[in-house]
Amino acid sequence: GTKDLADAAGKGANKGFMREFFDCINAIQGVLNRGKMNIKAMGDILEEALQATTDDRQRQISNQLQDLVQDTNAVISEVKGALEQLKARSEAEDAKKPNSAEGRIRKNMQQAMAKKHQQLLLEFQTAQISFKRALQDRELREMQLLCPEASPEELGQMIEAGQTTT
């Protein structure tokens, strides 16, 4: 969890800095993987949401999604904090040994982790948008069944006004 990453990013004297650095990178990678699994689960839940036929089931799915969104937000925040801490420690180490090969290795690894963090953020935003659109499309189809004479614009206005099928 958050404490593990903070511990990994903030440890000091016991090990060599590079060993500790790679341990922290490994911990960050594990948390990023948790975020990726959450996003995949969001896709699975979307399928369930589109097939849900009762309000109770829709509520259960909504709660599952909310849990995944909260956990994924925590992952994104956790990784960001760990990367910032790692960067600060690495810069302090670079000040002691400027232009070292180890410094270049650390910088490359940090950039790779930052890119993975950014990719996770983009995938998360895409998943949220897809989920929202799919549910809006389903709601529109349901409204079309209830009001076949209404134009798409009228249906859109009815949905925006809160006149839904539930």
Image (cartoon, rainbow, N blue to C red):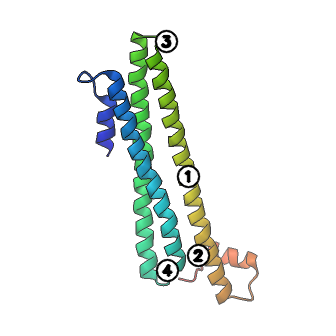
Q: Mark 3, residues whose alpha carbon is within 10 Å: few (<14), some, or many (≥20)?
A: few
Q: Earlier in the sequence, mark 1 or mark 2?
A: 1
Q: Mark 4, residues whose alpha carbon is within 10 Å: few (<14), some, or many (≥20)?
A: some
Marker disc for residue 123: 1
> Label 3's element?
loop
Q: CA distance from mark 4 to mark 2?
A: 20 Å
| Residue located 39% across and 30% down the image | 85
Q: CA distance from mark 2 to mark 3?
A: 61 Å
Marker disc for residue 52: 4
Kind of residue at disc 4? Ala
Q: CA distance from mark 1 to mark 2?
A: 29 Å
**x and y percentages locating residue 46 in the rendered image:** 52, 69
Check disc 3 and report the residue beneath it.
99
Q: Earlier in the sequence, mark 4 or mark 1?
A: 4
Against 149, residue 51 (above or below) is above
Q: Nearer the viewer, mark 2 or mark 3?
A: 3
Against 57, residue 106 (above or below) is above
Against 44, residue 126 (above or below) is above
Q: CA distance from mark 4 to mark 1?
A: 24 Å
Kind of residue at disc 1? Glu
| Residue located 41% across and 22% down the image | 90
Kind of residue at disc 3? Asn
Q: Earlier in the sequence, mark 4 or mark 2?
A: 4
In the rendered image, the residue lying farthest to the left is 14
Kind of residue at disc 2? Gly
| Residue located 61% across and 76% down the image | 138
Check disc 2 and report the residue beneath it.
162
**x and y percentages locating residue 150 in the rendered image:** 74, 84
